[in-house]
Image: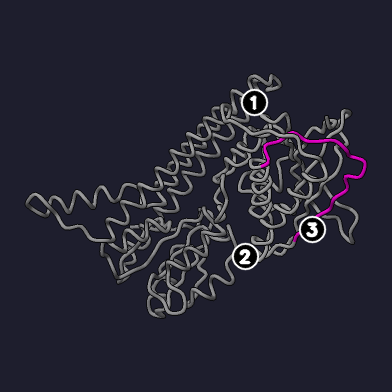
Amino acid sequence: MFLRREHRPVSEILVVDDDVTSLAIIEETLRSEGYAVHAYESAVEASELFEPAAYDLILSDFFMPGMNGDEFLKTVRRRDSETPFVFLTANTDIQLAIDLVKTGADDHITKPIVPEVLLFRIEKNLRDKQNERTVRQAERERELFEMERQKLVNWRLLYASKDIHQTEQMINLLSRTINQAGGFLWVDLLEQQMDSEEGETIELSRELIEMILQAGRGQKQVFDYISFISGLDELELDRKPVPVADFVRAIDAHMREVLGGLAATHRRTYYSMIDTEGLDGVVEVDMDYTRRIAAELVFNAVKYSPEDSRILLIFEPCRDSRSGGLDICVRNMPTTAQACDREGNRIFGIPYDYTELVFDLFYTIEAFPVNIEGEEWSDGTGLYVVRQLLRRQDAWVRAENGVDYTGDTPETFTKVTITLPVKEAS
């Protein structure tokens, strides 16, 4: 028996099913329990109208014309990594279970629809997600309280805190990568098959072997990456003096080349502005890693900006350096973050009241759901790598929010700036 939901917040449920009868049963069942239902017979239509964070749960059929459930899930996950996604399917074979796990589904319900089971599974997924958010919020509040209590103005304490958070980030990265490759479901499936067969040899399906290999590759990639991160301080850099003009031309060309490919895929426009007149001398850098650092900033500008927005690349003298320096700026319109400020409001751009701290910890209050194909340092570790590599080259990086009043209407922007010291040519 299920309790009515009149005294609880209304949950918004997106339902997609091309079977009109099933859709009607689901709508009636959910609405009778107080849920707000948004029903579609087409996954194509649902994906076109989908807005991130607009729903508390998504319920979708698996086999549908025009766009199958797995494609619909991929479309959703590219824009929303948080909302629970539950599949409806009449198919319960092992391969489908593997695919659902690999593509990021939270649960699945077998047809024909049994109202009691449907309500139980939906309530469970909503409850699990809410518990997860509550734990995260409590932990965030605890951290902020500790920061206030300890008055983290001591930079030694700040960097100790950074190391703890970075370790947590790497653990989360390892967990996500393993789960994206099917987690350890392959262990259970392999054990089941071994228990069901006798003899010295067993015959494995290609699907299971591919799943094992994919999981192994993903885990190896993460461990190799952790080794790279841990060895940044000992990494051998090939630093050489490069004339400022030559350096700017090379980095600008590389950034525009990277952005050119991303812009076509992710619907961004970009502009390059160079104003280094009078800035003579050389920068002493490892050109290979500097190109990779520049590419990382470009990837992040695309990841954390809305579609159809513009990205600016700016090269100019550093106005904050008395000894002379070169600024490389990447400026973009910001998106709304998943994280919230102390009052519970969604953060827009870089959290202004924790700018230095949060940037130094690489947005550790953010979940890093966005990855772009071709990105070298993903899952929230990229800016950490950038900062460490720049520090090794006597350079630094900072982030800030701002407002541009030069257009017809004020435009909020986020800017990440690399500052390289400029030395006299010997």
Residue placed furthest toward the right: 278
* Real-space CA distance between mark 3 and mark 2, rounded to the nearest whole angstrom: 17 Å
Instruction: Name the image quarter holding residue 396.
Output: top right
Relative image position of residue 407 (x, y in whole percent): 89, 59
Toward the viewer: 9 or 13? 13
Give neighbour class at mark 3: few <14, some 14-19, many 20+ (Cα, 10 Å). Answer: few
Which type of secondary structure does the marked residue at label 3 adopt? strand
Toward the viewer: 32 or 223? 223
Relative image position of residue 16 (x, y in whole percent): 46, 71
The answer to which of marks 3 and 2 sits earlier in the sequence is 2
Type of residue at label 3? Tyr
Q: Which residue is mark 1?
A: 147
Give neighbour class at mark 1: few <14, some 14-19, many 20+ (Cα, 10 Å). Answer: some
Q: Residue at x 42, y 52 (%)?
A: 180
The answer to which of marks 2 and 1 sits earlier in the sequence is 1
Which range is magenta? 270-287
Quarter of the image that includes the C terminus: top right
Q: Is 260 left, or right, of 119 in this rendering?
A: right
Q: Which residue is mark 3?
A: 271
